[in-house]
Amino acid sequence: MTQEQCTHRNNVQSSEKPQVYKVGIYGWRKRCLYFFVLLLMILILVNLALTIWILKVMNFTIDGMGNLRITEKGLKLEGDSEFLQPLYAKEIQSKPGRPLFLQSSRNVSVNIVNSNNQLLTQLVTGSSGFKARGKMFEVKSTSGKLLFSADEQEVVVGAERLRVMGAEGAVFSKSVETPHVRAEPFKELRLESPTRSLLMEAPKGIQILAEAGDIQAICRNELRLESKDGEISLDARRIRLMRLPEGKASTSSSSSGTRQTVYEVCVCPNGRLFLSQAGTGSTCQISNNVCL
């Protein structure tokens, strides 16, 4: 190769520009990347705004959430609260001076169990009524006086007055033990046994008193007043014995005079009373056909 050819080749090579290789994302790929970054920033801002809104609506604070507050004594709820699952708590109380309101669409049950999960006491209020289960039930006044008590042995009413407002009164299938039975003012007191006998018994005596009315005793078969050790006294200005049978004297002992209108009260050996026409002497012996 001649010197001229070498010089021309070097001039040609020197006239060519060096080739440069670009590193990075260009074109439509770059635009897609910017779009996704922008979309991600928008989603982050929307998520942050929604989080702040939820915190604001739910009233999240350092002490709790919404109406729920966490205090040293436990949880504090303000306003209405709804529990979808069972609630277990040691103590439930309302704010001072405010009532405690429990509401349920079906029933409200309060159960007391022992360590073996056995039911001891149960209180159920529902649409069918109010039910209580336990060994004893007591109702006391604010001063601590017993008003009502019930257990398997007896039912005690500690109030000064027991009032029965029903039209049929009170029905007792067994005996009743009480020191005093009194009707309301200007009301009548009626003791009645429609199909069986009525027995009133006391170890020291029975007093029946009607200060502003009458006393009436009606029975179908027998009315018995019995005193084993004492006496029966009828103390009144007028004692009337209605519908006593009239004894008839025999024909041999009857007088031939006009019929008498005056009678005497006679007593049979069995205690039965009857009337006999009065005479100059007692006519009970000759008119005792009622005692037969």
Image: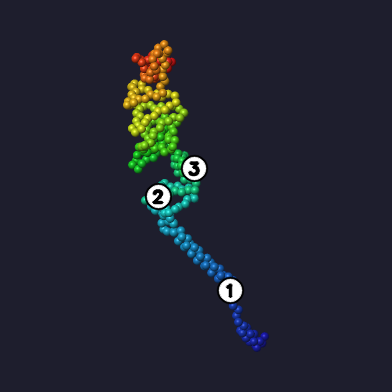
Q: Are marks 2 and 3 in contact (CB under 8 Å)?
A: no
Give me the C-alpha separation between circle 2 and circle 1.
Answer: 72 Å
Dot 1 corresponds to which residue?
26
Q: Would you identify the image quadrant in which residue 226 lies?
A: top left
Mark 2 secondary-structure assignment: loop
Residue 188 horizontal/vertical position (percent): 39, 34
Dot 2 corresponds to which residue?
99
Say whether residue 29 is visible. Answer: yes
Rendered residue at 37%/31% (across/down): 214
Residue type (three-letter) at the residue carrying disc 3: Ser
Dot 3 corresponds to which residue?
128
Give me the C-alpha separation between circle 1 and circle 3.
Answer: 78 Å
The vertical placement of 145 against 287, above or below, is: below
Graded by Cα atoms within 10 Å as few (under 14), some (14 to 19) or many (20 or more), the crowding at tag 3 reads: few
Give the camera-side residue of 255 and 34: 255
Q: Are marks 2 and 1 in contact (CB under 8 Å)?
A: no
Give the camera-side residue of 132 and 21: 132
The vertical placement of 292 against 187, above or below, is: above
Lateral position of residue 62 relative to residue 15, left or right: left
Residue 41 horizontal/vertical position (percent): 52, 67
Residue type (three-letter) at the residue carrying disc 2: Pro
Graded by Cα atoms within 10 Å as few (under 14), some (14 to 19) or many (20 or more), the crowding at tag 1 reads: few
Residue type (three-letter) at the residue carrying disc 1: Tyr
Rendered residue at 38%/20% (across/down): 261
Nearer-N-terminus badge (2/1): 1
